[in-house]
Image: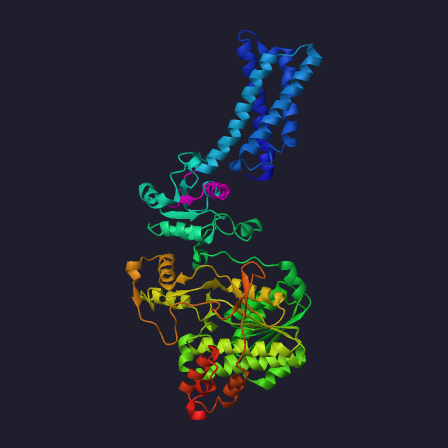
């Protein structure tokens, strides 16, 4: 109904209700009197009619969307009708020197019944209109709090969706067996499977925004015991800003089930550290580097220099940032290899960044076992090139993105990452530039993570290959890792190795099982195959080793491991003799060096002595 039609039809309809209510009330009290001819009825009717319409406009009764009516709308109706009756009583007192109390009370009740009934019948019609063109899916809502009620109300009132809520699940025992918006609360989250079976549920919506990662994981585990499609309520902040609507549910992601809470940043400190500054990011086209760029741009730097070896990846992140921040930030795309020392010095000299984030690296563990020379050239020599260029041209802070695999490394990739830490720690001893490193675990969704491989295997029908049923890893999301790197830079004093408290490690096989379930399959359909540990892999990862100095957290969930540097000469030897050493010699050398085995005869391969 259009707004003009509403303003015509509703007042006319209310006028009929006013006259009908008055007539019936007088007829009840005076059944044998010709009430229509009495001056009392005429004056009372006109007074009540005028006062009702004035108050109806005042309380916006003709502007409300009655298909969404609730207690607030009912309260407005009661107020408008009550005040109109009071005004009519005053007019009666002035005109006839008495108030017809019984008549007005009956009129008030009839008036309230007809007006309220007409409006709420409108809501009932809108809420329960049969959808002829769609087959409705029975939906179970997990969470009977404010978010759950918001979801239920939206589904009941929205004619465009094909979901019909039939019940709630909630862990609050006081809500059990109660009806909320006409829907029963049928049990706790432990009874999800039985509720789905008994009610023939097709669809589950998790509507508990306050649920922790572990709680969400537990709930999803119960949902995965059923064949119902499981989705989750969008973020409340996205609903509030209008990015999505309440009924635009999204699929549950692996990130939702990670089992750890994201770190909260010190926005003020980071803003002071980055706002108006010139920032350079190496590896800017990679999954970690590009996300670091996105996060940095939120803090309004004056300029951001995107350094990368691959032109396509640099082009994509440049276009993304330019479209969003091009008017506020000077965005400079640079194609360059960190192994090219002259190019790194050239870039630093031309753009003179104040902050550098060094994300460029080879990160694939088994691949680097086959290519140790390239790992050293990129992860060690490349880091040395960028770090020394930063020192030469007066960079204030240099942040190296490291890895948990740098702790007690048994593989080439982890060893080269630890040696890269040693390089910047040595520079920090004498430099005005603050050199720091940030260690974190595996990153979900990055190019080198296991998730894309699992998804590909699931799409192909399985099986999913897991190295060992007991293998565990620390996990975090790309945005979390990037925010940590930025926060660490703002806390840098020089020489630190920042480490995130990443919570409990996750079994890779559990991650695989969750991903299979999230893809809509059962474990039996896809299958899991154990392939054995690959070259260079460890069963368990660490974030600090026993020789590193543990300190109190410098920020919630951020610790410092002050690793000791003792092998400066050996690092120089490695870089000078790199081309002369064989792959096996390089592999042995870097692992020994990274683990601080300081005996020179043991470190330096016998063929080179």
Residue at the far left in the pictured view = 524
Q: How are the residues colored?
A: rainbow
Q: Residue at x 57, y 33 (%)?
A: 72
Tell me if residue 321 comes above or below residue 107 in the rendering. below
Magenta-colored stretch includes residue 146: yes
Question: Quarter of the image holding residue 473?
Answer: bottom left
30 on left or right of 516: right
Q: Quadrant of residue 101?
A: top right
* Image coordinates for residue 43, horizontal then vertical, percent: 66, 16
**How many numbered markers are drawn?**
0
Residue 136 shows up from this direction: no
Q: Position of residue 36 (x, y in %)?
A: 59, 13
Between 6 and 183, the one lying in front of the other is 183
Q: Residue 170, percent across and down?
A: 42, 41
> x%, y% of residue 108?
58, 20
- Which residue is depicted at the point 48% across and 61% down? 502
Q: Farthest residue toward the right?
A: 94
Q: Is residue 30 above or below residue 510?
A: above
> Which quadrant is home to the C terminus?
bottom left
Q: In the visual, does 65 lie left or right of 545?
A: right
Residue 192 falls in image quadrant: top left
Q: Which residues are magenta?
A: 129-153
Is residue 115 part of the magenta span, yes or no? no
């Amino acid at each position: 109904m259009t707004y003009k039609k509403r303003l015509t039809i509703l007042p006319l309809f209310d006028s009929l209700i006013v006259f009908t209510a008055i007539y019936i009330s007088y007829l009840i009290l005076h059944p044998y009197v010709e009430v229509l001819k009495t001056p009392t009825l005429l004056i009372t009717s006109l007074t009540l009619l005028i006062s009702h319409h004035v108050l109806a406009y005042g309380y916006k009764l003709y502007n409300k969307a009655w298909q969404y009516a609730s207690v607030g709308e009912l309260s407005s109706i009661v107020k408008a009708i009550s005040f109109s009756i009071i005004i009519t009583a005053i007019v009666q007192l002035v005109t006839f020197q008495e108030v017809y109390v019984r008549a007005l009370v009956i009129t008030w009740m009839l008036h309230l019944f007809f007006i309220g009934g007409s409006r709420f019948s409108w809501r009932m019609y809108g809420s329960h209109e049969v959808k002829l063109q769609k087959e409705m899916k029975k939906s179970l809502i997990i969470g009977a709090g404010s978010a759950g009620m918001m979801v239920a109300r939206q589904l009941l009132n929205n004619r465009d969706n094909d979901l019909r809520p039939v019940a709630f699940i909630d862990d609050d025992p006081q809500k059990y067996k109660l009806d909320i918006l006409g829907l029963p609360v049928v049990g706790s989250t432990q009874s999800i499977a039985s509720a789905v079976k008994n009610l023939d549920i097709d669809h589950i919506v998790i509507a508990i925004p306050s649920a922790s990662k572990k709680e969400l994981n537990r709930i999803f585990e119960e949902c995965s015991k059923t064949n119902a499609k499981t989705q989750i309520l969008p973020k409340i902040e996205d609903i509030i800003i209008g990015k999505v609507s309440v009924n635009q549910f999204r699929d549950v992601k692996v990130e939702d089930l990670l089992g750890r809470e994201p770190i909260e940043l010190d926005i003020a400190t980071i803003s002071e550290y980055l706002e108006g500054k010139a920032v350079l990011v190496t590896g800017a086209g990679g999954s970690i580097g590009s996300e670091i760029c996105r996060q940095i741009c939120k803090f309004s730097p004056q300029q951001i220099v995107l350094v990368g070896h691959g032109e396509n990846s640099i082009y994509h992140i440049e276009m993304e940032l330019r479209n969003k921040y091009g008017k506020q930030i000077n965005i400079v795309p640079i194609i360059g290899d960190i192994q090219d020392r002259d190019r790194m010095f050239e870039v630093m000299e031309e753009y003179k960044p104040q902050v550098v984030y060094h994300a460029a690296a080879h990160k694939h563990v088994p691949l680097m076992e086959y290519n140790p020379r390239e790992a050293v050239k990129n992860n060690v020599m490349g880091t040395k090139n960028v770090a020394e260029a930063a020192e030469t041209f007066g960079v204030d802070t240099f942040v190296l993105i490291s890895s948990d695999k740098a702790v007690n490394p048994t593989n080439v990739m982890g060893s080269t990452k630890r040696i890269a830490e040693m390089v910047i720690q040595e520079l920090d001893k004498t430099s005005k530039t603050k050199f720091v490193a940030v260690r974190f675990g595996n990153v979900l969704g990055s190019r080198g993570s296991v998730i894309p491989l699992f998804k590909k295997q699931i799409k192909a029908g399985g099986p999913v290959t897991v190295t060992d049923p007991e293998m565990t890893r620390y996990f975090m999301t790309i945005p979390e890792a990037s925010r940590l790197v930025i926060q660490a830079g703002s806390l840098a004093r020089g020489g630190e190795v920042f480490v995130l408290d990443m919570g409990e490690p996750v079994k890779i096989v559990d991650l695989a099982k969750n991903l299979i379930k999230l893809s809509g399959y059962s474990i039996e359909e896809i299958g899991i195959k154990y392939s054995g540990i690959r070259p260079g892999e460890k069963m368990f990862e660490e974030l600090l080793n026993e020789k590193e100095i543990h300190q109190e957290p410098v920020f919630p969930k951020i610790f410092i491991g002050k690793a000791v540097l003792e092998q400066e000469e050996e690092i120089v030897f490695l870089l000078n003799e790199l081309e002369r050493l064989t792959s096996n010699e390089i592999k042995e050398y870097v692992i020994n060096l990274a683990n601080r085995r300081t005996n020179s005869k043991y470190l330096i391969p016998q063929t080179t002595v």
